Image (spheres, rainbow, N blue to C red):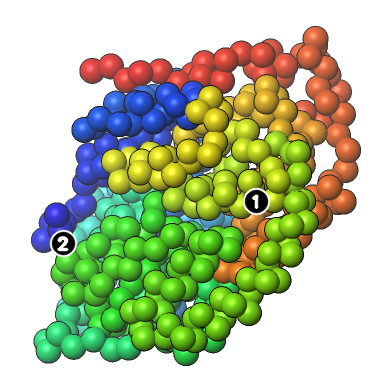
Amino acid sequence: MSYLTERKIPTREKRLSTISHFNGTLEQLKNESSGSEIKQKIRTFSQINQDEITSAISALASIKHAAVIVHGVQGCAASNIFFNAEGETTVYSTNLQEKDTILGSDAKLHKAISKIVEEVNPKVVFIVGTPVVAINNDDVNSVIFELEDEFNIKIIYIYTDGFKTKSPLSGIDIAAHGILRNIVEKTEDGEKSDFLNIITFSETKKSIEGITKLLDKLNIEYNLLPRFGSVEGLKNAGRAKASVVLSEDEGTYFAQELEENFGVQFIKTESPIGLRGTTSFLRRVAEIFGKEAEAEKIISENEAEIQKLVTDQVLSGKKVFLDGNLSDLPRLATLTGRLGGEVAGLSVKSIDLYNRSFLQRLDSISPLVPVIVGSGQYFEKANALSKIHPDYYISQNGNVGFAADLGILPVSLQNLVLFGYEGLFQIVNAIKNAEIFTSPVTAPDSESDTETSKNLYLSSWLKKSGSWYVKQETK
């Protein structure tokens, strides 16, 4: 079902029965997510984490020739410093004060847009909503209608408010919805050009190099969007021959709407991580663009060297806790096994009716391994790590320091080439370097809450059940 005729897209909870709170075993999660809907849970205590607003800012702030205005207090815009360090677009704030929350802030928004358009001359202005504006019920659209005519520029309201969803991924969908409705252009003739849309929302520039380099070798033109793309690239997205997503958790809505409304084929592939994932990805894309022979040459050139790398067994006899996107975990789990390791725990941001199929691809993992669902929640991860005592904590996210505090070797994949054959070499090197460069840490004293070690969490918490704060939602 397409939502492009709607002004707003429903939250992930309403569309996909998404849950962002769970702490249990893999078997329990499979059972609880197997029905026609997934029962919601709540956290009675939640650690600060990324939300829909910061996710939307991160998705938009790297688009060239665009301006992003966060309509709210300064703190909402300041989060861009952390969540989007690679953004090339300046993020502005309307800097609402107490008076604005009482009397309204339409005039302040009007002034901010006018000043930015005159000084920066962007091709598109995005206005990201915040809780303050949602409470005020500011008439943002009236300001937009007036200034679009005055400046002859596209101004798009991103309907994030911070209240209606617990899933950060809803912010990605809301940003994508605004782009699809207002920027992507339909072609009158329906003809397609010979290039590929690469849909990416949270990946770093470094992480996707392994894919773009392979496409360069195949002489396949590509259009990065929305992250690291441009306004012109977004306009032309509907003219592409096909689209791929680097994370199905994040990019599927964008790809599905491009296929349904603009006729751009959505190529569903395995996550291009490790030997099997990359080879499968490469063959599928090459088939669409008639580059099969070139792809097989690249595959054969890499397979022999990679087989030697895998034979090295850098994780032999080691237990590993994996933290990442659910759509990527099957490939990361397979890679862990091929390197001689055992997956002892998992953490993902959310589970929904779409991505739950990836749980079934984790059949090589014990059904009793602990699984944590939620963005952030490092206190729960620390609880699990202290009980299963893995050797490595491998995460697609950047925050891995808390694992080192527990005496566990941390491996962050965030600033590595993650995808493609090159990604495999970098992951293996990161695992090797973790043991070399991680300083030994004194384990916490299990009998005392006053230990002087670097541990961030009291032993009284680490002794509790990890699901202590996760409860079934009642209505």
Q: What residue did someone put label 1 on?
A: 338
Tell me which amino acid carries mark 1: Arg
The C terminus lies in which quarter of the figure?
top left
Look at discs 2 and 1 and give the one toward the viewer: 1
What's the CA distance linking mark 2 and mark 1? 43 Å
State left or right for residue 170 relative to residue 152: right
Can residue 228 be seen in this snapshot? yes
State left or right for residue 164 relative to residue 398: left
Among the 4 quarters of the image, the one containing residue 344: top right
18 and 420: which is toward the camera: 420
State left or right for residue 461 relative to residue 54: right
The residue at the point 78 percent across, 14 percent down is: 446
Q: What residue did someone put label 2 on?
A: 4
Task: From the top left corner, tell me how far across and down residue 468 is, in percent.
Answer: 52, 16
Task: From the top left corner, tell me how far across and down residue 448 is, in percent.
Answer: 80, 11
Q: Say which mark, if any, is on residue 466.
A: none
Local crowd size for mark 1, using a 10 Å CA cut-off: few (<14), some (14–19), many (≥20): some
Can residue 112 be seen in this snapshot? no
* Element under disc 1: helix
Among the 4 quarters of the image, the one containing residue 322: top right
Task: From the top left corner, tell me how far across and down residue 392 is, in percent.
Answer: 72, 41
Tell me which amino acid carries mark 2: Leu
